[in-house]
Structures are given as structure tokens and as C-alpha cells.
Amino acid sequence: MSFETPLPPYNASDPHATFLNSSCFDLLLIEMVPTAHRLAGELKAPREAEKKQVDDEEQREMAFRRLDSMGYRVGQGLVERFSRDRPRLTDTLDMIKFLCKDLWTLVFRKQIDNLKTNHRGVYVLTDNTFRPLSRMSMSTPAEAVSNAQPFLWFPCGVIRGALASMGIIATVQAETSELPAATFQIKTLSAKG
């Protein structure tokens, strides 16, 4: 699956290629966060019938796990599909560059703006105009930043899943201090042997 015009090295003549309008993807992301929160509340409530209200922090954690795991599977699938015609990447930095250039372009229609590393397994990816946050608005900037955090959980899962599919076990944390910018910190734990 890709958005609009495929960019090289994606083969438009692939009979199994399907294309999706990017606004459909934007709408899906917009609805995923409230749905994950609603499902977390509904699934928690029957187990604890005596509690009227589910603990907000626990519900937030359940929504995080749901969005992260969905993103993880999407990231795995994207790497499996779009790296099959490429030589196998062996260097961790090359894998991160593939993520920043090719995969990010495929999903968010632009490359990562900045990649920094300490060459010890920590990578910081900065996207100054992160698409899922570009249309977000609230009455105050602080409110917008706090409400934007759940919309970063799915992309964190996409990054983790993509890296896992390439053999890198990592933790991914995301934050935003000013919309629409987003920063993703990747800490690699180990590589599969």
C-alpha cells in the first residue's frame, strides 16, 4: 500500500500494489486514538463492576498498548513489503536511514527532517511538520501539546515494528513541545542473531 504516486524504488507495475488516498490515512489516525481510549474503558469496566470509573492513568496505558501494538504490526508489514526487492541492510545506521528516508516517505509523504545519533545505540529523529499533528488545534498551545501525545503512540509502534522486522530490538519514545513538530527517540537494545 502506498499513497498517490509511488516513488522509486516502489514499482507501480506491481500487480499486488494498492494505493490509498492520504486523507483516508489521516482520518484513520484521527479516529484511532479516541477509539483506543473508548475500548480501553469498555474492556476494563466489566472486570471491575464495583468501580464506576476506570482509573485514567490505567486507561491511558491500555490505549497506549493498543495503539503501539497496532503500529508495531503495520511497521512490520511495511518493511516486509517494501524491502523485499532491496539488498539486506546489515548496519544499524543504514536501517535507521532506510526508516527516515524511504519508510517515512511512504507513510507520511516526507522524509525525517533531522537524524542525530550518539553512535552508541541512541537515535533522535525530528520531524518539524509531522502530518498527524499538522491539523491539530486547541484553545491554548499547552492544551494542544498535551492532547497531541496520544497521536504519537501509533507512529512509535510503526518505528518499533519496522526496526524489529529488520532485526533491531528497540524502545521508542515520542514527544512534542510545539505543534506540529515531533521528536522520536530510538534506543536500540540488541540485534537478533
Image (cartoon, rainbow, N blue to C red):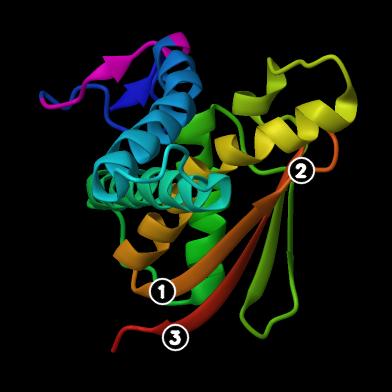
The x, y position of residue 163, in whole percent, is 41, 63
Tag 2–tag 3 contact (CB < 8 Å): no
- For the residue pair 189 and 90, the one nearer the viewer reads as 189
Magenta region, residue range: 16-23
Can residue 102 be seen here? no
* Distance Cα–Cα, label 1 vs label 2: 25 Å
Q: Which residue is mark 1?
A: 168
Residue 157 is situated, as x and y percent measured from the top left of the image, at 44, 51
Q: Quadrant of the N terminus?
A: top left
In this orientation, which residue lies closer to the viewer: 36 or 115? 36
**Residue occupied by mark 3:** 190
N-terminal label among 1 and 3: 1
Question: Could you tell which of marks 2 and 3 lies nearer the N-terminus?
Answer: 2
What is the distance, in whole Å, between disc 2 and disc 3 at their CAs?
A: 27 Å
Q: Is residue 19 magenta?
A: yes
Quarter the C terminus occupies: bottom left
| Residue at which label 2 appears | 176
* Residue depicted at x 47% and y 25%: 34
Dot 1 falls on a residue whose secondary structure is strand
